[in-house]
């Protein structure tokens, strides 16, 4: 075997190992099923890319925090947001905020705010995210962390049920509860959030 052939074989082997490791990492990613009043959504989250954010989200799932909450902010052409209020607009109590890790997530090859990704909602303070999350329904690259902006931490993506997301984003909205706009006129309820893997 020539040295060129040996190098080619070694490259092929290393590429194969890299691909198999990537596939294994994806298969090992935790999955969360949101059973909603409009259908199921399955999310895959990446603790290797955003460890603090994912641990925070999964703890809320395990604590049943999301069960009975609503998607209270729905903007077609932007995102659907939920996880903070019940159908009577009572705000759920939360744990202390999670540390923002947006830039670190992108440096590790984590997801950007593309269609179908899930990210943490927050106030103008980057370190204010608690339980509320949103699912991007378009590519919202202006929300990505950058040297100029902390952005929003995307930490997973929809792997099943994007048709449900599409149904939710299209619901009629209006003012309701404490919100002046963007609230579904018929509540979109998260019946349960469960860890399926």
Image (tube, rainbow, N blue to C red):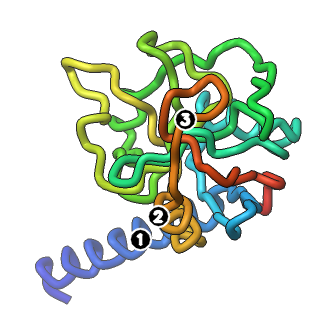
Q: Does residue 137 sit above or below 91 in this rendering? A: below
User: Residue 168: x percent and y percent?
Assistant: 55, 60
Q: Where is residue 86? Give x, y as percent.
A: 78, 36
Q: Which mark is residue 88?
A: none
Circle 3 Cα neighbour tier, 10 Å, few/some/many (<14 / 14–19 / ≥20): few
Which mark, residue 19? 1
Depth check: give the residue in front, 177 or 66: 177
Q: Disc 1 vs disc 3: which is toward the camera?
A: 3
Q: Quadrant of the N terminus?
A: bottom left
Left or right? Give the position of 113 relative to 186: left
Q: How many marks?
A: 3
**Marks 3 and 2: which is nearer the front?**
3
The numbered mark, 3 or 2, whose residue comes first in the sequence reads: 2
Which dot marks residue 175? 3
Name the residue rendered at 61%, 19% in the picture.
98
| Residue in view at x 80 percent, y 19 percent | 93
For residue 143, say whether it is visible.
Answer: yes
Give percent across and percent down for residue 155: 51, 43
Cβ atoms at labels 3 and 2 below 8 Å apart = no
30 relative to 67 in the view: left or right: left
Of 28 and 130, the residue lying toward us: 130
Secondary element type, mark 1 = helix
Q: Which mark is residue 22?
A: 2
Residue located 48% across and 58% down the image = 169
Q: CA distance from mark 3 to mark 2?
A: 45 Å
Q: Left or right of 78: which side holds 197? A: right
Seen in the picture, residue 166 relative to 13 is either above or below; the reply is above
Circles 1, 2 touching at the beta carbon (< 8 Å): yes
Residue sitting at x 52%, y 30%: 121
Q: Quadrant of residue 10?
A: bottom left
């Amino acid at each position: 075997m020539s040295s060129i052939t040996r190098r080619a074989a070694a490259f092929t082997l290393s590429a194969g190992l890299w691909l198999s490791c990537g596939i294994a990492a994806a298969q090992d990613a935790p999955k969360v099923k949101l059973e909603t009043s409009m259908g199921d959504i399955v999310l895959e989250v990446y603790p290797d890319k955003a460890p603090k954010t994912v641990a925070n989200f999964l703890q809320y799932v395990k604590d049943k925090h999301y069960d009975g909450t609503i998607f209270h902010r729905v903007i077609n052409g932007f995102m659907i947001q939920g996880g903070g209020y019940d159908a009577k607009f009572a705000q759920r109590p939360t744990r202390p905020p999670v540390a923002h890790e947006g830039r670190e997530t992108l440096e590790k090859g984590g997801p950007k705010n593309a269609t179908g990704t899930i990210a943490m909602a927050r106030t103008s303070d980057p370190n204010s995210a608690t339980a509320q999350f949103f699912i991007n329904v378009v590519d919202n690259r202006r929300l990505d962390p950058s040297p100029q902006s902390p952005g929003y931490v995307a930490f997973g993506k929809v792997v099943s049920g994007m048709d449900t997301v599409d149904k939710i984003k299209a619901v009629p909205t209006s003012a309701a509860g404490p919100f002046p706009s963007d609230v579904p006129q018929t509540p979109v309820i998260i019946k349960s959030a469960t860890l399926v893997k």
